[in-house]
Structure formats: C-alpha cells, structure tokens
Amino acid sequence: MKRITTIFLIIIALGAILFWQYTPKKSRNNNKIFQAKIGEKDDLIKAKELVLRNDSKSAIELEQMLDSPSEKVRSASAKTLGIIQAKESFHALIQSLNDSSWQVRMQAARSLGKLGDKRAVDPLIMFVSDPAKGIEARATAILALGELKAKGATSLITEILEDETQDFGLQIAAIRAISTIGDSNSEPLVKSFLGSERREIRFNTIRTLGKIGTVLSIDDLTKIIRNDTEADHLRTGALISIGRIGGDKASSILVEMLNHQDEYIGMYAAKGLSLTKNTEAVPSLLSFLQRVKDPYVKESVNKCIDLLSDFGR
C-alpha cells in the first residue's frame, strides 16, 4: 500500500513539473499580471472604504498602502490621506514627495496642502524648485502652498510669474496661489498677465484680481467688460471680480453694465452688485428686472435683489 501511495505521489509531482515546463511562459506571466491586477483592484476598493470608515486605524492602513508596488494604489492612498485629514500621516506624505511616480508625488503634495500643517511649507518650496519632480506635480505643490497661505513662498511664486520661459501650467498655479495667499503686494505683477495670449491665464488673472485686487485694478477689468470682442467667460469673470473688489467705483460701473444689450452681461453685473453689498443699487436692479425677458435671467436677478435687501435689514 505504501509503495502504491509513493508511486501515486511521484506521478502527481512529475505531472506538475511537466505542466509548468510546457505551459507557455507568456501564459504564466499573464496569470501573474491578472493576479496582480486583482490585488490592485482590491486595494483601490479598500482605499475608498477607508474614506467612509475614517477611524484611527484608517491612516495606518493607508500609510502601509503607500509601499504598494502598484502606482495606482500608492496614488489613491496619498490622495485619501488628504481627504480624511490624517494629520498623523504628515511624515509619510513628505516621504511620498520622492516617490518614483509623478502621480503619487502630485497626490502627496495636494494632501499636504489639505492637512494645513505649516511644516510642509519648506519641503514644498524645495519640491517646486526641482524641475525633475514634473510639471503637474509641481503645479499641484504650488496650489498646496496657496492653501497653506505660505507667505514665505511668495518670492518663489513671483520668480515663476516673472520667468517667461516657465510652463504656463505652473504660471496658472502661481496666479491662483497668490489669490489664496492673499498677497496684495503682487497685484501689479498679476495685472501684467491680463495681456497674456492664453485665455486660461487671463481668466485666472481676472479671478485673482477679484480676491487680491484694489480699486487700482478696476480700470483694467472695465476694459475687458466693455470690449464686445472679448470671450464671454472673461467678461463675466471681470464683472464678478469688480463686485468682489467693491466700493463706489465698482458699483457705478456695474450699474452701467445693467444697461448692456446682452441680458446675460446684465445678469453678471447684477451678481457683481450683490457682492458689493451696496443696497443703493436695488432700484437699478428693479429697473433692470422690468426689462428682462429671459426667465433664467429674471430668476437670477431676483436672487441678487433679495441678497441686497437682506443686507439692508
């Protein structure tokens, strides 16, 4: 009986060896890839589940996933640590700034901005200064510096804006970062980008001036509004930015634009007026409302009137 059992086991072993030897190597490799993809998918699902769970153990598990061989898993983990505000994972995210994948580096930079830890400012400045880190990741790091309101990054951001050879994606990020840092000293430099040939840069410049600009920017924004050949999103953006700057001069221009032949321009002028909190503009808005034909514009203007009326109470 023992002899029969031994012979049976030898046959099974020889069969396994022959199967492995004569199975095409490509087929074996495909099976490994398939198994790896299953593992990757499971880890990505797990990362999503940890967002919902968001307990003390979530950050620990996500940090462990930062060592995954899968780029997608590491990227998802770095992103999720920011979503759940895992402040205890600060050092792990700093280390991920040196990941071999630009996508992981980008998500790590974004999450560091979300954590709000000022200790990230210097590492992020060094990161942005290194061209080898990749344009997308560096642009995200600039935005993270903006989220951190890093005044210490202003000189670096200014250098990026002044360097005409810089990638326009970095410059857009720099303009947006200035708006969140709130550095009004950069207003003259930011205004210079209103003349850019790239509409995306001009649009972000207009938005930024609405956040850091003063009355000195109103004339430049007014030129855009009054130019009927300008793209609509630039003109409406300028109307909103003038409203954010506020003051008598802003209100006067916005009231004037209520008379524009295009009702949608008038609608954004009304939105701008609601941002000024100038209750004296209500009669002008009521007059504009009587002339409006488009139902959507009517509804929007009514909301603006309600907002200003609330400020007056």
Image: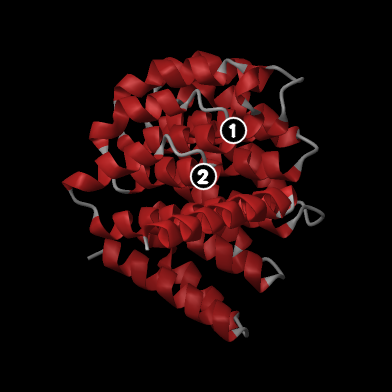
Q: Residue at x 60, y 81 (%)?
A: 291
Question: From where the camera sits, is residue 246 visible?
Answer: no
Task: Name the quadrant containing residue 200.
Answer: top right
The mark closer to the camera, 1 or 2, is: 1
Where's residue 57, x and y in %? 20, 46
The image quarter containing residue 196 is top right
Residue drawn where x is 69% and y is 48% of the image: 21
Of the pair 211 and 94, the residue shown nearer to us: 94
* Residue 78 horizontal side relative to residue 72, left or right: left
Q: In this picture, is 156 found above or below 89?
A: above
Q: Is residue 146 visible?
A: yes
Along the viewing direction, whichever of 2 and 220 lies nearer the viewer: 2
Q: Where residue 243 appears, x then y in whole percent?
A: 49, 51
Sequence-earlier tag: 1 or 2 = 1
Residue found at the very far left of the displayed protein:
56
Which quarter of the rendered picture does the C terminus lie within?
bottom left
The x, y position of residue 222, in whole percent, is 65, 46
> The residue tagged with tag 2: helix, strand or loop?
helix
Q: Quadrant of the rendered structure where residue 231 is? A: bottom right
Badge 2: how crowded within 10 Å, few (<14), some, or many (20+)? Answer: some
Task: Give the Cα separation between the discs numbered 1 and 2.
Answer: 46 Å
Could you tell me residue 248's position as x and y percent?
46, 46
Residue sitting nearer the eye, 32 or 134? 32
Q: How many numbered circles does the render carry?
A: 2
Quadrant for the N terminus, please. Answer: bottom left
Would you place residue 67 above or below residue 299 in this image? above
Q: Disc 2 marks which amino acid?
A: Lys
Q: Is residue 173 left or right of residue 111?
A: right
Residue receiving disc 2: 249
- Residue designated by label 1: 102
- What's the residue type where badge 1 is placed? Trp
State the residue at coordinates (33%, 37%): 63
